[in-house]
Image: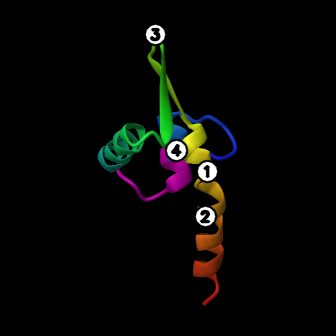
Amino acid sequence: LSQKKMRFGELQRAVGGITQQMLSKQLKEMAKDNLIKRKVYEVIPPKVEYSLTAFGKLGIPVLTELCNWASKK
């Protein structure tokens, strides 16, 4: 989500190894915490996009450094 808006299926493929139920739960929690925004388009079939909020974008540098640190074994 740091690069672009994504739909549910795109997120599931990007994360890998996560069930639909778990991803749905995590997305709801992240939306509740104002980390991501969920935009629903009134079309058939339904279309939903997820994107980072301004608050969520603040975490990118921290998470990047954490990933860099974790990869140094």
Q: State yes or no: discs 1 and 2 in contact (Cβ < 8 Å).
A: yes
Sequence-first disc among 3 and 2: 3
Residue 13 belongs to the span the image colors magenta: yes
**Number of marks drawn:** 4
Label 4, label 1: how many angstroms apart (C-alpha)?
A: 20 Å
Q: Is residue 61 above or below residue 73?
A: above
In the picture of the structure, the residue carrying the numbered disc 3 is 44
Q: Nearer the viewer, mark 4 or mark 3?
A: 4
In the current view of this chain or complex, which residue is farthest to the right?
Answer: 3
Give the secondary structure at mark 1.
loop
In the picture of the structure, the residue carrying the numbered disc 2 is 62
User: Where is residue 56 drawn, in percent x and y?
Assistant: 55, 46
Q: Amino acid at mark 3?
A: Ile
In the current view of this chain or complex, which residue is farthest to the bottom?
Answer: 73
User: Where is residue 2 drawn, in percent x and y?
Assistant: 65, 47
In the picture of the structure, the residue carrying the numbered disc 1 is 58
In the picture of the structure, the residue carrying the numbered disc 4 is 11
Q: Is residue 67 above or below residue 14?
A: below
Which span is picked out in magenta?
12-19
